[in-house]
Image: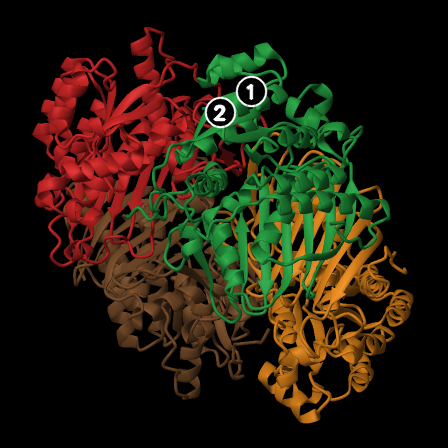
Chain colours: A green, B orange, C brown, D red
Amino acid sequence: MTNTTAPVARSPRIRLGMVGGGRDAFIGAVHRIAARLDDQYELVAGCFSATAEKSLASAADLGVDPKRAYASFAEMAAREARRKDGIQAVAIVTPNHMHAPVALQFLRRGIHVICDKPLTATLPEAKRLAKAAEASGVIFALTHNYTGYPMVRQAAEMVANGDLGDIRLVQVEYAQDWLAEPIEQSGHKQADWRTDPARTGAGGAIGDIGTHAFNLARFVTGLTLDALAADLQSFVPGRRVDDNANILLRFAGGARGMLWCSQVATGLENNLKLRVFGTRSSIEWSQEDPNNLWVGPLNAPRYRLTRNGHGSGHAAARMARVPAGHPEGYLEGFANIYAEAARAILARRDGTALDPAVTFPGLAEGLEGVAFVDACVRSSKRNGAWTALNL
Amino acid sequence: MTNTTAPVARSPRIRLGMVGGGRDAFIGAVHRIAARLDDQYELVAGCFSATAEKSLASAADLGVDPKRAYASFAEMAAREARRKDGIQAVAIVTPNHMHAPVALQFLRRGIHVICDKPLTATLPEAKRLAKAAEASGVIFALTHNYTGYPMVRQAAEMVANGDLGDIRLVQVEYAQDWLAEPIEQSGHKQADWRTDPARTGAGGAIGDIGTHAFNLARFVTGLTLDALAADLQSFVPGRRVDDNANILLRFAGGARGMLWCSQVATGLENNLKLRVFGTRSSIEWSQEDPNNLWVGPLNAPRYRLTRNGHGSGHAAARMARVPAGHPEGYLEGFANIYAEAARAILARRDGTALDPAVTFPGLAEGLEGVAFVDACVRSSKRNGAWTALNL
Amino acid sequence: MTNTTAPVARSPRIRLGMVGGGRDAFIGAVHRIAARLDDQYELVAGCFSATAEKSLASAADLGVDPKRAYASFAEMAAREARRKDGIQAVAIVTPNHMHAPVALQFLRRGIHVICDKPLTATLPEAKRLAKAAEASGVIFALTHNYTGYPMVRQAAEMVANGDLGDIRLVQVEYAQDWLAEPIEQSGHKQADWRTDPARTGAGGAIGDIGTHAFNLARFVTGLTLDALAADLQSFVPGRRVDDNANILLRFAGGARGMLWCSQVATGLENNLKLRVFGTRSSIEWSQEDPNNLWVGPLNAPRYRLTRNGHGSGHAAARMARVPAGHPEGYLEGFANIYAEAARAILARRDGTALDPAVTFPGLAEGLEGVAFVDACVRSSKRNGAWTALNL
Amino acid sequence: MTNTTAPVARSPRIRLGMVGGGRDAFIGAVHRIAARLDDQYELVAGCFSATAEKSLASAADLGVDPKRAYASFAEMAAREARRKDGIQAVAIVTPNHMHAPVALQFLRRGIHVICDKPLTATLPEAKRLAKAAEASGVIFALTHNYTGYPMVRQAAEMVANGDLGDIRLVQVEYAQDWLAEPIEQSGHKQADWRTDPARTGAGGAIGDIGTHAFNLARFVTGLTLDALAADLQSFVPGRRVDDNANILLRFAGGARGMLWCSQVATGLENNLKLRVFGTRSSIEWSQEDPNNLWVGPLNAPRYRLTRNGHGSGHAAARMARVPAGHPEGYLEGFANIYAEAARAILARRDGTALDPAVTFPGLAEGLEGVAFVDACVRSSKRNGAWTALNL
């Protein structure tokens, strides 16, 4: 029972602002806990809503100075940039179509960005944002939070080490059932914007969770995609975006795969699952049982690696807080993305060297995710024709 | 702890012959146990090998009269048909390309046929055989044994009862790893013929196990296929047939699906798994844990039905021999196909009424399976174009 | 996919009789399937009931010659012993109190005995029977069927090989819920005799399933018991025997253990589970998932051995019929006891050498089981005082 | 995907101090994360070590003002009590023997206490502390953190609602393997004090984890203990405290149980598991899979309740932060204890009404836990005689 995580050296907390995340939001609260968990951030400002009263109320809930509760993100960016104690980073937790306009306001003022996924609602917008962000030099983190799970890191490390041999097959799925009925038609706020093409983008399930599945597969395998063949459906009557996607994948080098994402998979909660099969071994990981990684070597018994358990390596240990057998979960995985981003921000701010092990999803992953959605939509419109990402 | 299976009324055992299934074979022994389990058959003759000595040796092993150990299946059919105590049914357990020639010899003499899957190695052959068999009037059972599992029957009953609502999604996979290396090149008998197009047919994994997966999905859902889009691969260098297939499915009525079959899925043994999602509920069944059926209703807790357990219905109970908690397995499921065929054969022979609940795979399923392989091969050659079964 | 079980050399089938196992019985049908599975026995006679009509009816169901359907087991023993083609072995599947009287009739005539557990209803009776059986020289098999499961054999082999190091802890439980309500008061035949001390003996759950749990722990560990401390309960109002037992165990050499058996464990079906912890490794096996054995080495990842899978040894392979991934179950495990007994009976009959690997529970295990029940009852009456077996 | 937890109304954070928890400690870091997670506490002072330098170094790590880093807890209590901005609560994370002396310093000054378990190292000490704490009127929380898991709350709610009927059986176990070897002899800091009777108390495993298991069973069932019969062992040569305990339990009203705790259970990580069986239903919960609660009703299928999932009730929802399918873990459960204590402290401080649903372990549970250890040791010394708690 030893504490295996080295303490992050104490440096003053990063002053953080937030755009979005008001009282009814889901993901804003998650970001705040993630930011708080390792004590590297301090939430000091926010444009929690475009309505001044609501933004103020949220600030009150959160202990944020009312003077720093804004109703306009542009004003927030401008005024915070002028303060001596202004925010050093901003968390963007709005619907997808607002990611780019908000991010641009902050990054052009040198404020680092931690943005929810997908990067943007459209591909041209993603390309513009990526270009602008690169030009600005700010640190840009995209919360593909599932890559923050320790055993996902372990899986990626094993692939990189060649433990699996040459990869032949990738099976990834992300299936939920919360949109199995047309709840967007009866005022469900989360469902409302996620099924509105104007706010969520051209992809429904494929954008909301398919991008996570794709990112997870890419992160673990390191393989690049040659082409995909997508069959998108909108099962629920009246739905304006896809709620299910069945996709075949072809990777550079010859590996093949399947990706299934669904928000109408009755009886499933948040079933994100990845299996990778190589010539020497395979791995299997499931988000609903995240502390275990199953390894299936050729001609030897199947075994289980646990977070911080025997046989688990450095990449996982960096992400773990408590001993094996004490489960960590979604919030810890999310916090790991914040912690990695904090390491990068602090190294930049304090002029210290950045541990080369630090990694987190950013612009490249964001751009690729939006291109993935775009390719799925194009393929499906052409009856599942093989389609490459437009990067 | 009650014995829930009604005894099958005692009638003299069905006299059974076998073609194939000599000393090195795998599936012949399985058929024999399956035939014996419920005491409805008596193995009395066989052409266990085309080599006389080997056929005799197998007969000796099995306690079969040496006079009824044949080296020619045609001779066997002719002579058994003339005997007063000749066989009433024949089990065909040869490589695929021999199914049709053997079956034709017996069925034209009015001998019932129990044939291993797939029906034949080629589609034209399958059509000819189906026609001839129908014309003959014999009972023809095809051992798609997985439909003999009680909880598969339970699943089908639930779908038929409308418990799942309208089916939207079908996810089925059958993945193994025993062909992850080129073992056919070093004399592995089972691998040898299964990777030889002349004996196995145009499909490799898709014929050997993909047909099982497809049949299972069809049996449980009752949905007919509109079209498929298949991406077949031969990962192992030098392999002459596919060893992996990634397939998209479109069913009549709008349901969609994915089918994955692989014999290079490192670390997996015999992972046949079916999930069906409807508007009201879903089911999940895995062959490696066959006594449980998981049910995932919309807006209610997930639950587990067990073989002979509370909440499980009549269709499953018909197939079960021992109380809940006492696992049954592969052999019992296989034996259920034999038992169902026996009920049909005995009803025919004894002139009794056949329980309308009796069901087993036969010519229609066999023909469809071969058409499925054919469509997969055609689709894959056209780069995964949507392709209908040629039935 | 290789057939790993060597065929048992063909020799004429063992002629088998049965006492008990009429139409309403549960375990008789199980014994018959077990006897049939590997084709080593032929059921030719029976006293299926003490009522002549019922015995005849069962014989008709089973295809047994009506002339060899008896209403008196003593008459059956006498007449079968006189026949040239008389039975060579008898399966006893009566309530417990009849085991000894029946067995004595047959073994004194040199007819081998395959007897359901526990050996007898009382300890003095067990001692007398054991003495008589040893004197007779017949082969005596007791169907502690759970030791027939391949992965139980694997576990025992690993302990014997020292893979676990020195054993420290044994945790075994056998919990069901079928007697959670007083069903014996409303005519449930199985419950009726199992809760009647005159027929079942002094122990209820402890005799019916506790003996299985104890035998399993003994078989796998090889440890002998120094003493036990038992707390027996009869939870169901009106019940005349225990329906739950909580027991502490002390083994020779210092290992300790706990044994729980219950027939009122609401929600459990047939949960027999064994865990053994040594200085170097541990094993875990569950009857409801019998094809897997989990191994937990010290300071290394937990792994899974599968029946016929990689890393599984000879002792398990001897007991397996089909490849890894094709589940075997309760009937196959039960059949393995019959197959082992057949090997012993055939070696005796045919004068051939017996494979030293053959093992099956017999008189010693039977005697110990009854002594275990006796010790539990005595300990519990003395408020859980530590009590040794009276052997 | 809705955020089901109502925000705790914003009130200034509780000023928290800590005693213990310096650089090498395990549990101190856990307490700090737990305190931070819901943003109700601010760590402002600490006596992280009795060595001034070490205490200062830890303060630096943690961002605590060096002027408030103490080397003497008595001095800390005295000086903090005099400050206007002094701490309002103290977290005590020292070895067991220091809990009482430290707690007494703070509670007599009206500073609320959050203390790690067990309450004290000895029973007389526990009684004195409980008396003093009650007299002081401070809020006293004991971090039996496992009762903070949402599905443990769900289980307790179901028992309280009568969903299980009358409870008959309680099976609880807490097994680990980290002390399977004598690591305390080679300088392992956590093992060192936990195996030293002077610091850990008379119980080893029974105190460290047995108290958790007992508390969990008590919390969920509400049953009080009549007597226990304990068989304690020290398996590892040279070990001065028990490292395994096998215990029988008798509860008031007739329920029976078994409790096993072990720190030499090779291959297990942190296996805390509770099963409760009533006349109508049963529940099963495992700490390593904490987001699921399995329910086994009599005569109906087994089902799974998930944290925030369908069918889960208010008591669990109060403790959950993210939607079903997004796992929460050990830190969230621990944080729930801190959050409950915060609700009590804030209600006291702000003079607001306390939600009657708030519950957390305190003095009564602590006293009972130490009495449990004491009774186990006494019982074991008397060869497992039935022994009541000395309360």
Q: Which residue is mark 1?
A: A79
Which residue does the numbered mark 2 point to in the structure image? A86
**Image quadrant in which you'd find residue C235:** top left
Residue D21 in percent (x, y) is at: 24, 37
| Picture quadrant where residue D66 is located | top left
Residue type (three-letter) at the residue carrying disc 2:
Gly
Pointers 2 and 1 within a single chain: yes
Front-lying residue, D118 or D257: D118
> In the visual, does C301 lie left or right of B126?
left
Q: Is residue D264 left or right of residue C142?
A: left
* Residue D310 visible somewhere in the drawing: no
In this rendering, the answer to whether B180 lies above or below A98 is below
Q: Amino acid at mark 1?
A: Arg
| C-alpha separation, residue under disc 2 versus residue under disc 1 | 8 Å
Q: Going 59% across and 55% down the picture, which residue do you hit?
A: A275
Residue A298: give x, y in percent of width and height: 53, 69
Which one is nearer the viewer's eye here, C35 or D332?
D332
In the displayed structure image, the side of residue C202 where residue B28 appears, left or right:
right
**Which element type, helix, strand or loop, lies under badge 1?**
helix
The relative height of residue D214 versus residue A25 in the rendered view (above or below) is: below
